[in-house]
Amino acid sequence: MTKLNIKNCARCKKIFMPVGKEKICPDCRGADLELEEKVKSYLRDHPGITVNQLIEGSGAPAKLVWRMIQQGQFENSALKDAQYPCGRCGKLITRGAYCSECADKLKANAQKFAAAMNSKRRAAEKKAQTFSDSMYDAMGNSRER
Ligand SMILES: [Zn+2]
Ligand SMILES: [Zn+2]
């Protein structure tokens, strides 16, 4: 049975068929691209402005502008401070989704989680081992009888 690959758009909740890992529908993506163009042309017309001035002046959502910075769309551009807030603590950063402290913390958490998962798996394997041993014993015993 083939599963029909449909999704609800993360923004407008409309059902659409995503290509790859797309989260938003073609309509919303088109609107995003239009906004990105608007942001870029505003920056072209106002070189040397800050991120906040760009967000205010272009009328684009801050999240969209931040994402554009994160994607490197403003590298070597006329933007004065290509910074955006860390996704966890809000500190201004210039690359990645999180500041270095948050990235470290998240990494430590992920490692802790992985370690916990590993010990859980080992315990399960041990159990499976014990189980098959006892099965073997039971079989051996039944054979002897
Ligand atoms: Zn949509
Ligand atoms: Zn942070």
Image (cartoon, rainbow, N blue to C red):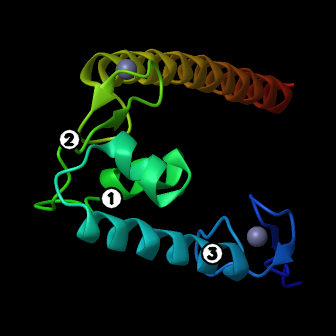
The image position of residue 83, as x and y in percent, is: 27, 38
The image position of residue 80, as x and y in percent, is: 17, 45
Q: Is residue 144 above or below residue 47?
A: above
Taking depth in this image into account, of 141 and 55 the one nearest to the observer is: 55
Q: Name the residue under label 2.
A: 81
Q: Name the residue under label 1.
A: 71
The residue located at (15%, 62%) in the rendering is 77
Q: Which quarter of the rendered picture does the C terminus lie within?
A: top right
Q: Is mark 2 on a helix, strand or loop?
A: loop
Disc 2 crowd, CA 10 A, few/some/many (<14, 14-19, 20+): some
Q: In which quarter of the image is ligand 1?
A: bottom right
Disc 1 crowd, CA 10 A, few/some/many (<14, 14-19, 20+): few
Q: Name the residue under label 3.
A: 31
How far, Cα to Cα, is label 2 from label 3?
A: 25 Å
Q: In this view, does 24 lie above or below 112?
A: below
On screen, residue 53 versus residue 81, left or right, reads: right
The image position of residue 45, as x and y in percent, is: 27, 69
Whether label 1 lies within 8 Å of ligand 2 gets the answer: no
Q: What residue type is labelled 2?
A: Asp
The earlier-in-sequence mark between 3 and 1 is: 3
Q: What residue type is labelled 1?
A: Gln
Residue 94 sits in which quadrant? top left
On screen, residue 84 versus residue 56, left or right, reads: left
Circles 1, 2 touching at the beta carbon (< 8 Å) = no
The mark closer to the camera, 3 or 1, is 3
Q: Is mark 1 on a helix, strand or loop?
A: loop
The residue located at (65%, 23%) in the rendering is 124
Tag of residue 127: none
